[in-house]
Image (tube, grey):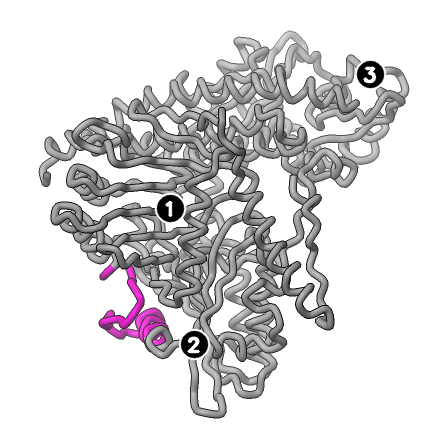
Amino acid sequence: MNDKADKAKIPYINRELSWMDFNFRVLEESFEKENPIMERIRFLAITASNLDEFFMVRVAGVKEQVDLNYNAEDPSGLTPAKLLPKLTERIRSFTEKQYSCLHRSILPALKRNNISFLHPDEMNEQQKHFISDYFDRVLFPVLTPLAVDTSRPFPLLANKSLNLAVRLKQQEESYFAVVQVPSILSRFLQVPSVTGQTFVLLENVIIYKLDELFERSEIRSSCAFRITRNSDLEIDEESEDLLIEIQKSIKRRKRGKPVRLEILQRCDAETREFLEEMLDMNPDEIFEESGPLDLTFFSKFASLPDFESLCFKLLVPVYPPPDFLGYDDIFTAIREKDRMVHHPYESFEIVVNFVRQAAEDENVLAIKQTLYRVSGHSPIIAALIKAAENGKQVTVLVELKARFDEENNIIWAKKLEEAGCHVIYGLTGLKTHCKILLIVRRDEDGIRRYLHIGTGNYNDSTAKIYTDIGMFTCKEPYGKDASSLFNVLTGYSLPPEYNRFIVAPHGMRNFFERMIAKETDNARNGLPSGITAKVNSLVDPAMIELLYKASQAGVTIHLIVRGICCLIPGLPGISENITVNSIVGRQLEHSRIFRFENAGNPKIYMGSADWMQRNLDRRVELAFPIEDSDLKKRVFAILNLMLNDNINTRVMQSDTTYSHIDKRGKAPCDCQKEFWLLTQSKAEKFVQQDESKPFHPIHSADLIR
């Protein structure tokens, strides 16, 4: 199946449409009445943030292809011109459902909890006086009304900024003005109330006081609007200074071509026409919403301290993780055997402390690490800086091309350099997405390499909500591979033959293709066969074709794909042996795990890569085998528990729709809840065995919702 016609025959869901299906699944959590109300609001905000990024990158890309008359079909048989109207229709359906959820479900639920949003015309005199005072003291000095006429052009508005278009009349002449709602201030303001907690949105305060901004004009109408710009960076990687080139690209992002205009449904026709003309928008790029615009603000709203009782119960990760219980020294624990940590159930602090201990250990000679996304106040980077200050040789590859984290990564790269670390800014033409930390230490019996390798970023913030798995080892074959990989990343070394590592872009695709083909052959020869894969996205057509062939040969295939899945399961004669589950719950499923039955001797791998073209062909990715027998059993159990989940799981049907599992007659199984309970139970048992230990893990099952 090499030519385009053949590829179109492969049952395949368009990537963008599949992503929209995923965001619909996230939105379902906002409707879920079993979720606390603030968590439902948080899910709604997540869907809005997801959609923003989708427009900035994916929709913008499709529009560019249409503008360039690019007519090639994707594997689903759609050209960009055919896809765009389908995508627009799906997005309009989605946003309609978002606002239906907000107005028919969430706001009434808030009201039952005595929490409400008011417009100024719904307020009593005391409340009106309060917002007027706030406007005079805080808002008025910050606002900058911008008139638009023959001498004053339409302003360049920031991407995703919220603005007001105001139609005015002065001395029989009409004109428009734009007022940006200041993002530096909170989007919502609490006002005095005797009936509960009452809030007003900032844009409504400004609208209420518009006459004080335009005292000499008659205000005819006003409408909130918001633009989303093309934000996919174009980077000249042949530039002499990649850091400077990326900084320039970030500035270009702020003035990218608008790809979406959001306005309120009550926007009058003249104002709509004005915005459409000024922003050069087509009608199909304009989205009328019932409001409020930009639902992402609900994320901060749900995090207000007063609302803790309306959120999920706080879950405290176990520290030390069960694999390190009873060990004061991390290096000692790793020398004894390979160790594994499962976040967020087990604290990411063990990884941070691994670097901290290395920074202070006089026997540690060098630290090497890749960083893709890190937090704003990264303890990992603080530990690396401390290590450099203590004379260790510290080498860090900071991926400057990590989308939407470029600015943060530039700041950290400069700080690391200032501290004396050797900093590499990624590789030309490739993103470095692998997750690896190498510590070289002088032990009593010689030089030993200690490793942490895993599925997730070295980000202490996201590690609290993303599910990821990391392995610690000091086994020599892994250590040699780590050194070889860093030599490739930091120098001009050719990719070597690795002992254990599977590395993209030079070897990972071939590896997975061989493993799938081997299972296919085993099934044909009557040997035990099977594939279980957990990824974030399954897009690659070649991988999908191989999975179809494996299914046709009788291989049982279980796929756990949180997000985009272009494979269609359950098709007679094609994929009837394939199931696709999507787990969307309290934690964001992020780990990548691959199990192959291997004729009765199962092999298990983990890593950083999804089954997408970009991961297999255009990134430096790392996958690795789990060889320790105890750890293998543990990962098998993790996969089995996820496959038994019937609370957070949606199952893809052969018509590409997703449905919840019918729980009638079945015991409820929430795999994420069960992972918390299992981790707490292990910690409890250890404490009971040795009460003399100083730590006291949280072990109350009441903390689990």
| Residue displayed at 53% across by 78% down | 331
Q: Is residue 70 shown to the viewer in this render?
A: no
Left-right relation of 452 to 511: right
Residue 675 appears at what percent x and percent y? 55, 49
Location of the N terminus by quadrant is top left
Disc 2 packing (10 Å; few <14; some 14–19; many ≥20): many
Nearer to us: label 1 or label 3 = 1
For the residue marked with disc 3, what is the amino acid? Answer: Met
- First along the sequence among labels 2 and 3: 3
Compared with 686, 10 (above or below) is above
Give SS at disc 3: loop
Q: Residue at x 77, y 17 (%)?
A: 120
User: Which of the 4 quarters of the picture holds residue 642?
Assistant: top left
Marks 1/2 in contact by CB < 8 Å: the verdict is no
- Residue 260 percent across, percent down from the top left: 45, 26
Q: Position of residue 410 (x, y in %)?
A: 50, 60
Left or right, 536 with reference to 29: left
Question: What is the number of the mark on residue 535?
Answer: 1
Residue 275 falls left or right of residue 1:
right
Q: Which mark is residue 474?
A: 2
Q: Which residue is mark 3?
A: 123
Chain part drawn in magenta? 481-507
